[in-house]
Amino acid sequence: MSTKIGKLAAAFFMAGLLCLSQFPVPVQAQSVALVSGAITIAGATTISGSTVVAGAINVAGATVVSAGSVLEAGSVIEAGSIVNGEAVASSTVLASATTVTSTSILAASSTVAAGSTFASSTMLAAGTTLAAGTSFEAGSELAAGSVITAGSVVNGTTFSSATTLSSAVVVSQSTSLAAGSTIAAGSVLASGTAIAAGSAVVSATTIAQGSVLAQGSFAASASVVNAVAVSSGETLAANTAIVASTSLAGGSVIAAGSTLAAGSALVSSTTIAGTTFAGGSVAVANTAVVASGSTLAAGTVVAAGSIVNGASIASATTLSAATVVSGSTVLASGSTIAASSVLAASTIVI
C-alpha cells in the first residue's frame, strides 16, 4: 500500500509539472546447468520458445507475459495485474491452470507456480535474476557484453577470471555460469530452458510487432529494438516499424507520430514526447500520468485508484465513450488503453 501511495504522490507531482571473444561451437547439443548463486539479466532478453518454470518464482516488478503462456494452478496474481484483458482487483490464487490468450501483465509481488510456462516473445528485462539450478537449452545465446565470472565453463572453455564477451556465443555444449555472471541485452533463452525456483522476473516497456516508433524516439541502454541490443542509448534516425522483439528500458522516449500496436505494454519509466496513437489495446503496468489533450477511447479500462479529469475512480471502470483529458488524470496499474486512444505530449509512465 505504501508503494502505491508513493507512486500516486509522485504522479500528482508530475501532473503538476505538466499542467569475451567468440568460442568454438561443438556440434554436440546439451542443456546448460547454472551453478549456485544468482545470474543477473542486465538487459532485455527474449524467450524464443516455451520456457518452463521449474519451481515457484517471484515477480519482482511488473512482467509482461505473451499469449500462449500458461499460469499453473497455485499462481498468485496480485492486484494491478491484467490477465486475458481482465483487470485483477485483489490478490487471487489460481484454482486451475490458465492459458494466456492475449498479452497479460503480472503485477509486482505475484508468484508464478511450478509447471507454468512462458511463451515465445515474452521478454525479461534488466533486474531479472535466475536462481541456481536454472538450465539453458541448446540454441540459447549469450549476447556480446555478457560478463562471465571466474569458474564458469562456456562450451567447454573454462574461465579463470571475469571476462566480457566480445561477440555473441551460442550455447551448444555443457556450460555453467558462476555466481555473479550477467546476461547482456539481446540474449535469447531457447525453448526448453527451465527457470529454477527462487528466480525473480521483471519486464520493461514492451512494443508489440505492428507498432511504429517515430523518428526521434530514444531507446535507452539495455533496450532491444527489432531483436538488436542497444548498448548505450540510441535515437532513432527514421520511423521504425516493429517487426521483431522490442523492449524499451527505463528512460526511453516515444516520439510524436508513433503508433503502439495491440499487445504493447507501458511498464518501465517512459516518456511520450509527442502525439502517440494506440493502434490496439495497450496495457498500463505502472502508474501513468496522462497529459491534457489526450483522448481515452471508449473501451478503455480505468483501474481502481485512478483519477480521470480530477475524479477518483473507486473500482475498475470501462469508459462507454471517448474521454478528452482536460484535468488531472492518472491511470493506475491494471488499466488498459483502448484502440483509437491518443496520448498527448508529456504523458509519462513512472
Image (cartoon, rainbow, N blue to C red):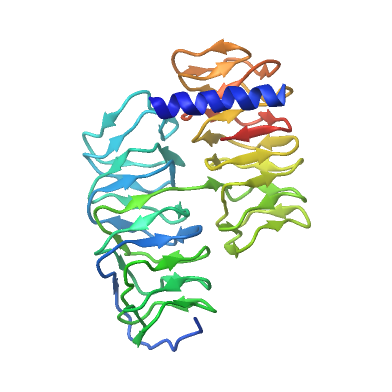
Which one is nearer the viewer's eye here, 91 or 20?
Answer: 20
Residue 76, quarter of the rendered image? top left
Side (left or right) of 344 relative to 49: right
Task: Residue 267: tell me if it is visible.
Answer: yes
Residue 91 x %, y %:
30, 28
Q: Residue furthest top?
A: 311
Give how far across and how far down residue 205 sits, in percent: 55, 45
At a point 53% along the width and 73% down the height, the residue shown is 144
Q: Could you tell me which quadrant the N terminus lies in?
A: top left
Using the image as rendered, state which of residue 162 and residue 345 is in the foreground: 162
The relative height of residue 198 versus residue 335 in the rendered view (above or below) is: below
Picture quarter with the C terminus: top right
At horizontal 74% and vertical 23% (from top left) the residue drawn is 293
- Number of marks in picture: 0
Expressed as whole percent of the image width and height from the top left, the position of residue 276 reads 71, 37
Q: Position of residue 67 (x, y in %)?
A: 43, 46
Name the one closer to the observer, 232 or 133: 232
Is residue 263 depicted above or below 195 in this figure?
A: above
Asked whether residue 294 appears in the rendered view, the answer is no
Is 191 on the left or on the right of 283, as rendered? left
The residue furthest front is 161
- Answer with the quarter of the image where residue 151 lies: bottom left
Judge whether 313 appears above or below 56 on screen. Answer: above
Give me the residue at 47% from left, 53% from top.
125
